[in-house]
Structures are given as C-alpha cells and as structure tokens.
Image: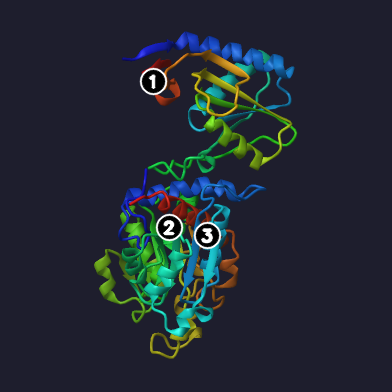
C-alpha cells in the first residue's frame, strides 16, 4: 500500500487507513531500533534536509536520527545561520535546497500553512514538523502508535488532552487522528485556553480536571508555554498547577490502567507532578523512541510515492 | 492455465526430506536457528520446525525476517513494499542460520536476506532452504535444501498456497 501524497503536511489530509498503515509500518522500524546495528539501507543515496525556522531540539533530532537510521544523508539548516537572515524568501531557500539534491524536506515554521505552500511548489517530498498553531502530524502519529502499543487498539479509547489546546498544534493533530480512528476525545483546561467553540470538532470540553479525567484510558498532558504567562490566559503557574496540574490523586480518577503521556519538554510542578511523570504508568520516554520509528516510517513511505 | 506442481502430500514429503537433510548436514539441530523470510518463508520455517521436533525431539525457535528495507529495487519499483516485523529470538552470532523461503527465483530476495541477517549478527554459517527452486538466477546464489526443482519460463509465476493462509496446500504454476 502506498500513501496517496508525496507529502505529509497534515493529519486532516490522511485517511484512517493511511494513519493505520503508517503506525503498522512504524512497528517494523521499531524492531530496527532495538538492534546492535540500528541502521537499514532502505533510503541509501537519498538526501533529507531539515529546514527548521523555529527552534527545536527534540523534533529535529528525532527526524535526524530517523533519517540516518534509514541511511539517508541529512543536512540541517537553521535560519539564524542561513541566508534567511539575509532576506531570502522561503521558496528561494527551498529551491536552493533542491538544487543541492534534496529528496525530502522536513520543515518547521511559525506560520501555519507553510508546509502546504512548500509542498505545492517543489517536487521533493515535504514533511511537516510543526506549522504555527495548525498541526504537528508526526507527533500525533507517534502518540497513536504509543497508545496502540499499550492499549492494543485506538477504537473506543477515551483520551483526555489537558492544557493549552488553543495554541497547540499537537492537540489539533491528535484530535483529528483520534477522531478518524474512532477514539473519544475530551479536552481539559481553563476556558481561556480551551474555548467552548472547540466542541465543533466533536470533542468533550471540561474545565474541571477531576470531572474530565473520570474513567479515561489515556491522559495526554500538554506543555504550558511559560511565555503565555501574564497574558490573561491564567493567573500564575502556581494556580495553574493547583487547578490543572496532573497529580497522583487526579490520576486516580482515570481508569486503573490508564497511561500518562506528554510530548515534552515537561514543566515539572507546573502541568505535571514529578511523581506522576516518573511513575510506572508514564509512557513519556516510550514516546521519544516511538517518535523515531514513526518518523522512519513517514520518511520511508513518502519517498515511495512517485507523482 | 494453472498447472499443479505439488499437492498437499507432495509438500509434506518435501518438508520431511528437507528436515532430514538439515539434520544430516548439521549433525543434529543443536546449533542451528531457523529464520523464515516474510511472509511465505515463515510458514515453511514453521513446518520445518514441527518436522524437526518430530524427528529430533527438541524444539527450535523460528525467527521472522523482513527484507523490504534491504531490497535492491526500492528506487525503481512503483509501490513501497510493506514493512513487516523482524523478530529473531535466537542468537545469531556463531550459530548456523538456516534461511527459509518458499520460492527461489532470481536470488535477489536472498541477497537482501543475507544482508539483513548480517546486520543482526555474524552467523558461523548461513544455509538456504526453499520449497521450490524455479531457476533463472540473476545472482550467484544456490540453495542447500530444495523441496522441488521446477523448470519454468520467465513469464510464468509459481504460487505457493498454504493452509496457514486459509487455503488448501498446493503449489501451482501459472
């Protein structure tokens, strides 16, 4: 089976079957990560360019490791060190990158829709590594992969996503993906960050943490961006933790075998208590490993699509 | 037109003979590991394992090997092959590994499988068992254990039907 598009720019564009296919493919790649020789020759001779217009260590490193495990060459371009600061347009940068021989461009940009624009304008495969507040598709795919590994299914799961939904591309991609695969999503957080209009996405909205966590299978915490402080979204990090921080007592509201997820980096003591983050039910580090497997699967599958 | 090459009984006899040959060549089965190539080879490997257990009384682990990431045609083929699991539960280093596949044709899958195995460890020897050898090798590869040699022409296809896939055991030429 092939993906329909040479690009992976959003979960919205994927069918349920495509999402499942990516997750199943990732399981095969995870086997590779457990070996002494953690490398396969599948994409030998191809070149991947990481074009990151926003600071990122985790996602960029994860893509870089994934690309290297597939034997592609990797070039990292960061705006602060590139000609972008000299005024070059995005499209010119991308064309230059192509002229250097790139087959896959992984892009992160603060403006929503940038990967879509690039995908329409260049022949190389474009993979979205996060665009503004729109989507972060590979994060959602790795989250679903982790849920499937732990729960054996996605269909029918009750998933609570807690925190700054409004500004979160991770939350949006997860909502789209989980809905397509038949899971039920609840969003929990202060009304300033979880506005009621999100109900239109077919999700439940809860301002009260204890109500929202009742009986869920998965608790997905989001990072509270400290730069949102003092902008009227919530009074203080201390108060945020008191109302929406994940503590052991709150975890007890969820199902007994519920798993705890976080895309990282965590703010311990702000959105999640240390004892919870380090507990046996936390799968936060599994998410990191699964992220490499998912990105390998995505790079492998998009490079198989010839348009 | 489909022509039957092997029926259920023939397949069983071939497996029995191959099992005996594996035992003879390796002087028992204590230092060998069976690895089936996804997917058809896995079924044959499982049958060999059952037969070896029947004869020798001891059980062998069967490994699964996916070779799609080692193929030499990834750049040219239209569809990206489906990546399946690779799980080799036995030690590879300094063991004799018997690779198992259903049909041996150009030898390219076996070349890929050899590379895949070498990335998992360094076996003391690598042997090849196939249910059907249909000829037309494009690489210098030869099987150690063959269920049946079948002369074919390039435009024919050998299809192995096995009960593991919910159909009756038979090998046909189309």
Residues flagged by tags 1 and 3 on a common chain: no
Label 3, on which residue? Answer: A287
Query: For the residues carrying marks 1 and 3, which lies nearer the camera in this image?
Result: 1
Neighbours of disc 1 within 10 Å: few (<14), some (14-19), many (20+) = few
Q: Between residues A105 and B155, which one lies in front from this camera angle?
A: B155
Q: Between residues B79 and A200, which one lies in front from this camera angle?
A: B79
Q: Is residue A233 left or right of residue A56?
A: left
- Residue A143 image position (x, y, % from top left): 45, 59
Label 1, on which residue? Answer: B156
- Is disc 1 in contact with disc 2, using a CB cutoff of under 8 Å? no
- Residue A255 against residue A232 in the figure, above or below: above
Q: Is residue A306 left or right of residue B55?
A: left
- Residue A22 image position (x, y, % from top left): 42, 50
Q: Which image quarter holds the C terminus of chain B?
A: top left
The number of callouts visible is 3
Q: How far apart, in angstroms, are the residues tagged by discs 1 and 3?
A: 47 Å
Q: Between residues A208 and A16, which one lies in front from this camera angle?
A: A16
| Secondary structure under the numbered disc 1 in the rendered image | loop
Q: How far apart, in angstroms, are the residues tagged by discs 2 and 3?
A: 10 Å
- Is disc 1 in contact with disc 3, using a CB cutoff of under 8 Å? no
| Secondary structure under the numbered disc 3 in the rendered image | helix
Q: Is residue A282 visible?
A: no
Q: How far apart, in angstroms, are the residues tagged by discs 1 and 2?
A: 41 Å
Residue A141, disc: 2
- Residue B142 image position (x, y, % from top left): 60, 22
């Amino acid at each position: 089976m092939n993906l329909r598009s040479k690009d992976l720019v959003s979960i919205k564009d994927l069918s349920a079957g495509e999402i499942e296919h990516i997750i199943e493919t990732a399981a095969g790649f995870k086997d590779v990560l457990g070996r002494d020789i953690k490398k396969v020759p599948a994409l030998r001779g191809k070149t991947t360019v990481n074009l990151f217009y926003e600071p990122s260590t985790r996602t960029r490193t994860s893509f870089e490791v994934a690309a290297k495990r597939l034997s592609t060459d990797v070039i990292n371009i960061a705006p602060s060190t590139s000609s972008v600061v000299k005024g070059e347009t995005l499209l010119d940068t991308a064309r230059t990158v192509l002229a250097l021989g790139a087959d896959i461009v992984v892009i992160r940009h603060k403006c929503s829709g940038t990967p879509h624009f690039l995908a329409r304008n260049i022949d190389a495969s474009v993979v979205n590594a996060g665009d503004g507040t729109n989507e972060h598709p590979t994060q959602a795919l790795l989250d679903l992969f982790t849920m499937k590994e732990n729960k054996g299914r996605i269909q029918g799961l009750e998933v609570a996503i807690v925190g700054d939904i409004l500004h979160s591309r991770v939350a949006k991609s997860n909502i789209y993906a989980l809905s397509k695969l038949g899971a039920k999503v609840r969003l929990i957080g202060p009304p300033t960050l979880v506005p009621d209009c999100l109900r239109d996405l077919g999700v439940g909205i809860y301002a009260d943490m204890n109500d929202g966590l009742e009986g869920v299978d998965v608790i997905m915490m989001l990072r509270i961006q400290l730069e949102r402080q003092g902008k009227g979204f919530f009074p203080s990090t201390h108060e945020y933790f008191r109302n929406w921080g994940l503590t052991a007592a709150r975890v007890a509201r969820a199902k007994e075998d519920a798993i705890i997820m976080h895309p990282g980096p965590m703010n311990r003591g702000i959105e999640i208590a240390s004892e919870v983050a380090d507990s046996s039910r936390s799968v936060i580090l599994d998410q990191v490993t699964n992220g490499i497997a998912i990105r390998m699967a995505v790079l492998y599958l998009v490079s198989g699509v010839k348009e | 037109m489909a022509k039957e090459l092997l029926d259920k009984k023939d397949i069983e006899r071939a497996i029995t003979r191959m099992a005996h040959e594996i035992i003879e060549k390796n002087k028992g089965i204590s230092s060998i590991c069976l690895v089936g190539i996804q997917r058809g080879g896995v079924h044959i490997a499982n049958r060999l394992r059952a037969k070896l257990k029947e004869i020798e009384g001891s059980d062998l682990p069967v490994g699964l090997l996916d070779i799609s990431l080692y193929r030499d045609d990834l750049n040219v083929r239209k569809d990206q092959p489906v990546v399946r699991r690779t799980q080799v539960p036995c030690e590879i280093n300094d063991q004799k590994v018997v690779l198992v596949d259903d049909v041996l044709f150009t030898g390219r899958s076996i070349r890929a499988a050899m590379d895949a195995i070498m990335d998992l460890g360094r076996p003391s020897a690598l042997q090849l068992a196939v249910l059907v050898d249909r000829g037309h090798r494009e690489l210098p590869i030869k099987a150690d254990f063959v269920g049946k040699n079948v002369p074919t022409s390039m435009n024919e296809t050998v299809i192995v039907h096995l009960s593991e896939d919910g159909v009756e055991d038979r090998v046909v030429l189309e």
